Image (cartoon, grey):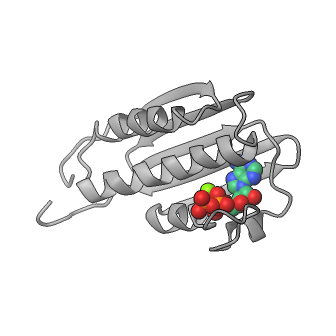
Amino acid sequence: MADQVIRENSMTLEFLSLPENVGLARVAVATFAAQVDITLNEMEEIKVAVSEAVSNAIIHGYDGEPRGKVRVTAERDSSGLTITVTDWGRGIADIAQAMQPAFSTDQERMGLGFAFMQSFMDGLEVTSEPDQGTQVRMFKKYKGERPGN
Ligand SMILES: Nc1ncnc2c1ncn2[C@@H]1O[C@H](COP(=O)(O)OP(=O)(O)OP(=O)(O)O)[C@@H](O)[C@H]1O
Ligand SMILES: [Mg+2]
């Protein structure tokens, strides 16, 4: 990574809110992320964060029904990788509450999706409007010198 020249690049992926598309998004973003030299561990963290955000869009944004569009973008510059996951679904009324670890509106769930995104990425921003949709923006920094990498 230290001497690597990182070229800017971006991609957009759009799909319907079907559960099988979680894997599609994860693989697409992982392949994009792998175009530069990152560690296996960083790759795993990115995959989990993308899976959690896309699962939320499908499960919560559209109540698990295949009626909505989900958009995933990935952009890289020399400082890092920015991933956005957008839905046009139900939205979140209280974002701060939703982001608290172990908070879920579904009793069957752990409420840990946002906690994973927060701890695995270097930045997390959520914007949402009830009945308009939700956008999750995540940033993963490219580390500088990493001996042993
Ligand atoms: N895209 C979204 N649209 C609407 N509501 C959302 C969205 N993403 C998250 N939420 C709300 O935020 C809450 C917390 O999300 P989080 O991912 O942390 O937990 P969870 O999805 O409930 O459980 P887990 O991710 O552990 O299965 C959800 O229960 C839901 O109410
Ligand atoms: Mg979740």
The residue at 37%/35% (across/down) is 32
Residue 140 in picture, x, y percent from top left = 44, 55
Q: Residue at x 66, y 40 (%)?
A: 58
Residue depicted at 61% across the width and 31% down the height: 18
- How many badges with numbers are in the image? 0
Residue 27 seen by the camera? yes
Q: Residue at position x 36%, y 40% from top? A: 30
- In the image, residue 56 sits, relative to residue 145, either above or below, namely above
Q: Is residue 76 left or right of residue 90?
A: left
Q: Position of 71 compared to 96: left or right?
A: left
* Ligand 2 quadrant in view: bottom right
Direction front: furthest residue: 108
* Residue 6 vs residue 128, the one in the foreground: 128
Residue 39 visible, this angle: no
Most foreground residue, 52 or 118: 52
Q: Is residue 39 left or right of residue 112?
A: left
Quick one: quadrant of the C terminus?
A: bottom left
Q: Residue furthest bottom?
A: 101
Q: Where does the image place residue 26, in percent across and percent down from the top left?
A: 43, 40
Q: Position of residue 75 (x, y in %)?
A: 48, 38
Front one among 61 and 1: 61
Whole-percent x and y of residue 132? 85, 40
